[in-house]
């Protein structure tokens, strides 16, 4: 039986796994400042509906997205905007990494 600390790590890892896909990150970014229907996202994100539905279900299950149904149309939105407090530092780390790589490449070009 895992101890409490292991359980917390498992919960965190599962949450991060729900983010660990380019399409899911694209969905979150697309919904950053709006609500959208599945049909809109299929068209804008250029993803097949069956695949999109699986990704939306994962994000909803993780508590990242929320949905509402209006007649036959399902609309999705970001449930908690704090998710962008998680994604922003990742982008910043990657930007620093890219700058460091560019500096190394520039130095190699001078050698």
Image (cartoon, grey):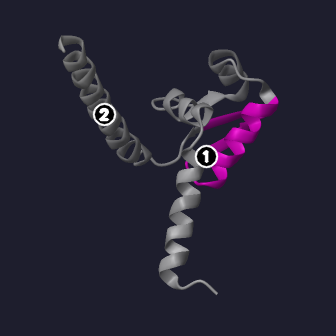
Looking at the rendering, the stretch of residues picked out in magenta corresponds to: 50-76
- Which quadrant does the N terminus fall into? bottom right
The residue at the point 75 percent across, 36 percent down is 53
Q: In which image quadrant can residue 94 be found?
A: top left
> Residue 4's x, y, as percent?
51, 83
Q: CB under 8 Å between callouts 2 and 1? A: no
The local secondary structure at tag 2 comes to helix
Give the image quarter of residue 55: top right
Mark 2 / mark 1, whichever is N-terminal: 1
Mark 1 crowd level (few <14, some 14–19, many ≥20, 10 Å Cα): some
Quadrant of residue 38 within the rendered picture: top right
Image vertical order of residue 36 relative to residue 93, above or below: above
The CA span between labels 2 and 1 is 33 Å
Q: Which residue is mark 2?
A: 97
- Residue under label 1, please give it: 66
Q: Nearer the viewer, mark 2 or mark 1?
A: 2
Above or below, comparing residue 44 to residue 5 in the picture: above
Mark number displayed over residue 2: none
View extreme (front): residue = 111
Residue 104 pos. (x, y %): 24, 25
Viewer-nearest residue: 68 or 6: 6
Q: Is residue 43 visible?
A: yes
- Say left or right for 2 vs 43: left
- What element does badge 1 sit on? strand
- The reply to whether residue 73 is in sight is no
């Amino acid at each position: 039986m895992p101890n409490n600390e292991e359980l917390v790590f498992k919960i965190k890892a599962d949450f991060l796994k729900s983010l660990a896909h380019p399409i899911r990150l694209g969905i979150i970014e697309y919904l950053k400042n709006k609500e959208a229907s599945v049909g809109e996202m299929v068209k804008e994100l250029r993803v097949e509906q069956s695949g999109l539905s699986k990704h939306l279900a994962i994000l909803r299950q993780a508590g990242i997205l929320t949905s509402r149904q209006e007649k036959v149309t399902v609309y999705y939105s970001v449930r908690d905007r704090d998710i962008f407090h998680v994604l922003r530092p990742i982008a910043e780390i990657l930007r620093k990494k890219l700058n460091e790589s560019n500096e190394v490449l520039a130095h190699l070009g001078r050698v």
